[in-house]
Image: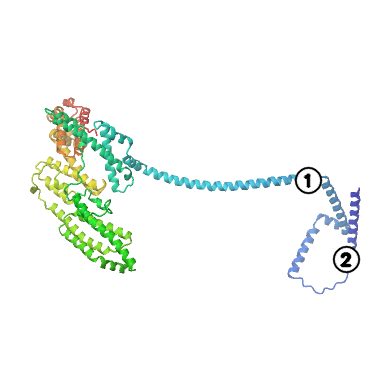
Amino acid sequence: MADSHQENEDNTGIRDTNEGDSNDVEDADEDLQVDLDLGELDLTSQDEFILDEVDVHIQENLEDELVKEALEKGVDLRQYSRQIEGDLHEVENASILDYIKESENIASLHNQIASCDTILASMEKMLTSFQEDLGSISSEIQTLQEQSLSMNIKLKNRQAIKGELSQFVGDIVVPPSMITHINETPVTEQAFIEQLHELHHKIDFAKEQSFKGALSVNDVGHILEMLKGKAVHKIRDYVLQRIYQFRRPMTNYQIPQNALLKFSIFSGRVALKNRSTIFTLGSRGSVLTSELEEPVIVPHAAQKSEKKHSFESLFRSMHFALLDNSCREYLFLADFFMVQKNSARDLFTAVFGKTLSLFLKQMDTYLESCFDAIGIFLCIHIVHRYRILMHKRSVPALDKYWDTVLEMSWPRFTYVVELNVDSVRNTDPQRLGVIDIRPHYVNKVLAALQVEVENFILRMAAEFPLRKEQLIFLINNYDMMLAVLLERTSEDSKEVESFQQLLTARIQEFVEEALSPAFGGMVAFVKETEPLLERGQGQVIRPDEKRIQQLVRGFASDWKRSIENINQEIMRSFSNFKNGTTILQAALTQLIQYYHRFQKILSQHPFKRLPIRSELINIHHVMVEVKKHKTTF
């Protein structure tokens, strides 16, 4: 009731206010009736725009249906305005009552909206976090893509080197089975021979890689040397035991000889390091590596040991002492007299001048009568290495001295090498005495002088009357020269390739010469007939049945004995057993090819109807016999 009363009062107040406003309006209308003389107004620019805008609004209101209807009926606009205002108050009050009536629902709706707002805020936060996670995942995916690309490149690189690296590891690694067999297995067993052959391969491979600077050789080098020593000791004991058997009276020497033939691999031996030749390096190169900074040779101690030293060893010892003392003296002079650079060098020269002159005089005296090209060359390299060593110590005191030594050494070295070349070029083979088919000592000494040595060998080979002997001589010498080159260079060097080509060509020619005595008729028949058949001219061939019968029956009766003769001839002719075995296999392979081509020709027109074809030896029988001569290691 109080609320109703309050509302009535409010309504009364509103009406009073409205009535007051109405009276004020009437008073204002009366005031407006005052005669206003505003003079001439200038309605331009913005004022004109405002008036035009007002006019537009008036026109729009006049077009309204309610306004038109009110104007047509002559309704009082003030009264009509009050009526409308009252209606609005009623609607407003009714709306307020509706809101009050629905207050609980509105409050519930407010709570729901607040709850939804909270949920939406939480969802917004969650979605924001999810968006950040997606961004992080995207960056991780990009990182994974980059890593995948990098791993793919690494995989391709590793696959590219896998084959070569696996081969290298297989050649350099010493397996436990090899160590076990070399140490424990008797030398007569096949397992020991196989491991000995593999050990030889690994030692050669390690030497080759050491020249290329492979550090892995240092890990297995001492193991290979120990296994080599053990194998040599066991083989030596075994061979000595077999040699002792010959001391027994009435001994059948052929039996132990045939037994030793099974172990012919034991006969391979390394050349001695102290060979009496000035053209062999041997261990002399150690003055540039392990002995470069060793202590100097003490004269009285060297006399007691009675050990002989080469000139490069004495040169190294003297100049290492000179280097060591020069470094100390130069640094002392520079610090004591407080001089640097040129002043320090001049002061050092004043102190050491006579000593350096004595060294140069001694060097000049030696070079005048020296024909040791390798010794001079080693001295030159010693100078280069000691110069680098002094530069590392920041002592340039001996630079002029080193230059003087090199200026003295290089001309003499060039002169000695030219003498060696001229000696080979001007040598007359007839003055060398009796020449046999074994490698000549001149070739062993001067194998490094490739161009002139090739010409020299050809001139020596021409002294033999038979072509086969010439080929044997050339093959033996080319093989020996190739072995010398492989000790100092790699297999892919130009020098090795050159001699390998020469050796291969001479071997092919020798194979034809070896087959000619026993199978020359068959070879000639194949070479004559095969081109005609390949050109389709078989109809012009007139089969010589008598000749073919001789070839077929001659082969059938003597082929085994001929193969054995070829085997014995090749084994006698070539000093290198491995090379001889290779040549034998090449000859037997060539024989099988010729015989296969011979059978193929007889199976074609006009030979296929000859009755002699039934007497042909099956080629498989020939292959079985050939395999008997195949090496087992």
- Marks 1, 2: nearer the viewer: 1
Q: Is residue 482 above or below residue 569?
A: below
Secondary structure beneath disc 1?
helix
Left or right of residue 71: residue 412: left
Q: Is residue 483 above or below residue 371?
A: above
State the residue position of label 2: 28
**Picture coordinates of residue 418, whole percent (x, y):** 16, 56
State which quadrant residue 469 falls in.
top left
Q: Residues within 10 Å of mark 2 (few under 14, many from 20)?
A: few
Outermost residue, bottom side: 39
**Picture coordinates of residue 214, whole percent (x, y):** 32, 47
Front-most of 273 and 438? 273
State the residue position of label 1: 107
**Picture coordinates of residue 386, whole percent (x, y):** 28, 58
Q: Is residue 190 above or below residue 34?
A: above
Residue at image coords 52%, 46%: 141
Residue 129 visible within the image: yes
Front-most of 421 and 444? 444
Q: Residues within 10 Å of mark 1 (few under 14, many from 20)?
A: few
The earlier-in-sequence mark between 1 and 2 is 2
Front-most of 187 and 373? 187
Front-most of 30 and 333? 333
Task: Look at label 1 and name its amino acid.
Answer: Ala
Residue 457 visible within the image: no
Q: Quadrant of the C terminus?
A: top left
**Picture coordinates of residue 577, whole percent (x, y):** 19, 37
Q: Are marks 1 and 2 in contact (CB under 8 Å)?
A: no
Secondary structure beneath disc 2?
helix
Task: Look at label 2 and name its amino acid.
Answer: Ala
Real-space CA distance between mark 1 and mark 2, rounded to the nearest whole angstrom: 47 Å
